[in-house]
Amino acid sequence: MRFPKLIGSLTLAFLAFVVSPHRCAAEKRPNIVMIMVDDLGFSDLGCYGSQIQTPNLDALANGGVRFSQFYNTAKCHSSRVALLTGQYCIAAGDTSLSHAVTSAEVLKDAGYFTAMTGKWHLKKQPTDFGFQRFFGHLSGACNYFKGDDSFRLNGQPWQVPANDFYTTVANVDFGLQFLNEARQTDKPWFLYVAFNAPHAPLHALPQDYAKYEGKFDSGWDLARERRIEKQQRLKLLPDGVRPSPRPDHIPAWDSLSEPRQRFEAKRMATLAAMIDRVDQEVGRLVDDLRRNDELDNTLIWFVSDNGACPYDRSSRGVEHQPTNGDVSFGDSTGWAWARNTPFRFYKQNQFEGGICTSAIAHWPAGISRPSGAIVREPVHLIDLMPTFAALAEAKIPGTYPGRQLRPVSGVPLVSLLQNESLEREQPLHFLFSADRALRVQNWKAVSFRSQGWELYDLNADRTELNDLSQKYPERLKDMVETWTAMAKDVVHVSDKQAAAVSPAVEPKLHPEWTNFDRDPADGVRGSGAAKRGKRNSTKQAKSNRPSSIRGRKNTKLTVADGVMELVCSGDDPGLAWDRLPAGLAAGPYVLRFELNSKASGAGDVFFTTDMETSLPRGEQIGFQPKHDGSWEEHRIELTTKLSLRKLRLDVCAGEGAAQIRALQLTDRQGNVLLAWP
């Protein structure tokens, strides 16, 4: 399980790209169209299980190949960095790209005409990084009808028209214009189309919205069932894959209020319309290639930057239809769950729902696999830049003016296109903000918001339902060590970003996920707080964030192999939870744990049912540990009928060492509400 040669092999792999470009089946270098969409769920296309009409993308999949394990970084800007540079985001210099070259620079130097349309979301402009033509916005999101002041055309400010403008359409309008210019040069060309759809704010053209109005009134439970059934018919995933169940933070559709159902149905109709429009514009681009006799030797690669977005940020005009720039909706956590069928979690999380998305490659002259084949090998956005370089017979430089280059981590996917096996020496590394993962062959270690690591065998459990961290602790330990080594030596993160995780908190929650207990209203964020500026919205997010355990004064807390180790060095030691999840079910509760103590003194549990009371004020329940160095079980009843907000556990009253494992807060029936570590 250890990988002692990985870091050293990076330099050799990098040099291989420089001196040994790959040959392909096509007789001449292909044109390349790279299409990236924004926040598309794994099952949002027809060829991935959806009922949304995407005939043009489905046709590309049927005439090319689909990928069932295509990975991204789970977030907008970091996926764009990975796509453009072949490196993990931080290694490349993040949005500055100060340690990387882009595919546009590599291909331009190899004689390609290079152009881009759409969302940039990085520093400077595309024309500073090898693109000879650019139309689009430098921002990470904008109004689809009104745009913003970051639009540029070939490096110069561009005024968004007051009428008859929609970004998805404009991106292809300018893309076709740039292709006409490329054809005058008699060079092969590279076109990167970065749609901002279906990223929020949710806006749809009226004619597209009309196609889906009322189509989602039956809700996400039924929609997800239909997607699962279609995925099974398509053989997209192996037989026997168990879809993840609906999580507790997503209510059953039938339990929602009528105003909430009405609003949620409109949100999904809008998303469907936006995805449908992307497909229509892709069709317009493909038709142009066909008319110019270029489709056969053009590699079209379609990807998403991350899975469906759960962040329910402010909506405006919730009683209306979002078919103009004055009405806009935020994303829905409920529909994000359905759109990521059959996986768990969402954008930013490093579970499959966040990092695995649809991907299509179409190239009649160069792909040797049978048309419509499903490629099941794990691949990543970092692989696309070296793939394009190989097919273009281009060199990835080792030096570049004004930048300190680092090695490319991706590998060319030419062998996969030729129906051969892929060789990858390095595991796939994942990190965005506090979320982490590592993919090593069929094994995956994953951490939610830098909480306890989980371990999954994706061959047997693709939807990550059976955590094997307790069964294979040594395997997990090795993988965590590999993740940490790569984080420091390959990704070049700070010590803080590579720090050990904290104990797990259950249930897994986020303050910007939709609060379904409230009816929709204008200006209300997912947690239910009306937006009143950055400072107040930050306070609201903090007030709803699930708390991790901290060691109190005179207490050193570490976690190893599922056991919390406490070293108590003075009076009043213990563990504290300063803020339990706001959505925690009401009591009564049972606090259960196993204790092995060599300390002394009585034990206590303190808790409050409000945020104003400071511990140890509140309720107190005493218990007597044995302190004899053997494991013992404790079951402590918390008889309140209200919801807990703060909790403290003292397992001793003075100096000594103690271990705690299997710590759970349950209801009286034994259903686990929270669990640590």
Image (cartoon, grey):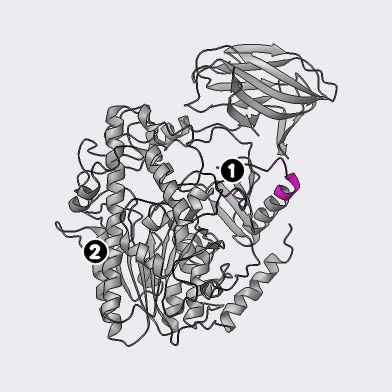
Is 103 left, or right, of 161 in this rendering?
A: right
Name the residue at the left extreme: 163
Relative to 540, residue 275 above or below: below
* Residue 143 located within the stretch drawn in magenta: no
Q: Mark 2 — residue?
A: 170
The answer to whether residue 390 is visible is: yes
- Residue visible at 72% across and 30% down? 661
The image shows residue 189 at horizontal and vertical percentages of 36, 79
Relative to 298, residue 4 above or below: above
Amino acid marked by disc 1: Ser
The image shows residue 28 at horizontal and vertical percentages of 43, 87
| Magenta stretch in the rendered image | 460-476
Q: Give the mark nearer the N terminus: 1 vs 2.
A: 2
* Residue 465 located within the stretch drawn in magenta: yes
Name the residue at the front extreme: 233
Is 330 left, or right, of 507 in this rendering?
A: left
Question: Disc 1 vs disc 2: which is toward the camera?
Answer: 2
The image shows residue 55 at horizontal and vertical percentages of 31, 61
Locate the C terminus by quadrant: top right
The answer to whether residue 402 is visible is: no
The image shows residue 80 at horizontal and vertical percentages of 44, 61
Residue 450, numbered circle: 1
Q: Is mark 2 on a helix, strand or loop?
A: helix
- Residue visible at 69% across and 12% down? 622
Name the residue at the right extreme: 628
